[in-house]
């Protein structure tokens, strides 16, 4: 909230005065500065957000809608980067956390001799459980059986 709160929707952005907007932009820019490189130029980011506040429609817009608007206009590069960071960070953190917690459940001391290929398959099944639940098992079993039924058995006379 402290870092991304002013970008969540158009009302949050429009409600900030210039001093609070500058403060929020400074915190955001400092967070995403790495050694000598930075993802966002602070002064340009602040200027772009000031113009964006005026040009955004009056109805409430969410962060993805604002990113779509900014991308369509094409003249807010720092704002575009900020919204892309906002919209991708929660996904990457959550999916990584979920993957590691599932991996911890799968790879315990009882299964420590499991090969990497099998571990990857089980991890994929656990992580993508919602897709796995929609698969019709009868169709899968029949398909597997029909592929194996084509084997020829040679009988010795």
Image (tube, rainbow, N blue to C red):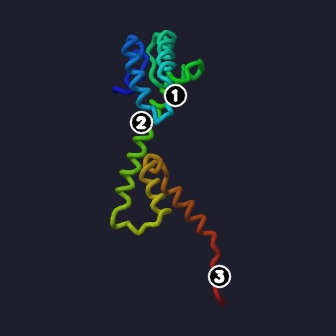
- Marked residue nearer the N-terminal end (3 or 2): 2
| Point 49% across, 20% down: residue | 45
- Marked residue nearer the N-terminal end (1 or 2): 1
Left or right: 134 as drawn, with respect to 24: right
- Between marks 3 and 1, how big is the CA–CA gap? 66 Å
Of the residues tagged 3 and 1, which is closer to the observer?
A: 1
Q: Is residue 132 above or below residue 30?
A: below
Q: Residues within 10 Å of mark 2 (few under 14, many from 20)?
A: few
Residue 91: numbered disc: none
Q: Residues within 10 Å of mark 1 (few under 14, many from 20)?
A: some
- Between marks 1 and 2, how big is the CA–CA gap? 15 Å
Residue 81: numbered disc: 1
Q: Is residue 9 above or below residue 30?
A: above
Disc 3 to disc 2: CB gap under 8 Å: no
* Quadrant, the C terminus: bottom right
* Quadrant, the N terminus: top left
Which residue is more in the foreground, 69 or 59? 69
- Between marks 3 and 2, how big is the CA–CA gap? 58 Å
| Point 43% across, 50% down: residue | 127
Of the residues tagged 1 and 2, which is closer to the observer?
A: 1
Coordinates of residue 29 in the picture (x, y in percent): 44, 26
Residue under numbered circle 3:
154
Which residue is more in the foreground, 56 or 141? 56
Residue under numbered circle 2:
90
């Amino acid at each position: 909230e402290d870092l991304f709160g002013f970008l969540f929707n158009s009302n949050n952005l429009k409600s900030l005065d210039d001093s609070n907007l500058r403060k929020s932009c400074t915190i955001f820019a400092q967070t995403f500065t790495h050694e000598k490189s930075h993802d966002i130029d602070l002064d340009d980011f602040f200027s772009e957000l000031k113009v964006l506040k005026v040009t955004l429609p009056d109805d409430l817009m969410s962060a993805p809608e604002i990113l779509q608007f900014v991308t369509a206009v094409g003249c807010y590069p720092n704002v575009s980067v900020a919204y892309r960071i906002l919209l991708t960070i929660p996904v990457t953190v959550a999916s990584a956390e979920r993957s590691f917690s599932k991996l911890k459940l799968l790879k315990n001391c009882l299964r420590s001799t499991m090969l990497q290929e099998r571990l990857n398959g089980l991890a994929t099944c656990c992580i993508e459980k919602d897709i796995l639940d929609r698969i019709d098992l009868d169709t899968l079993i029949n398909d597997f059986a029909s592929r194996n039924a084509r084997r020829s058995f040679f009988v010795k006379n």
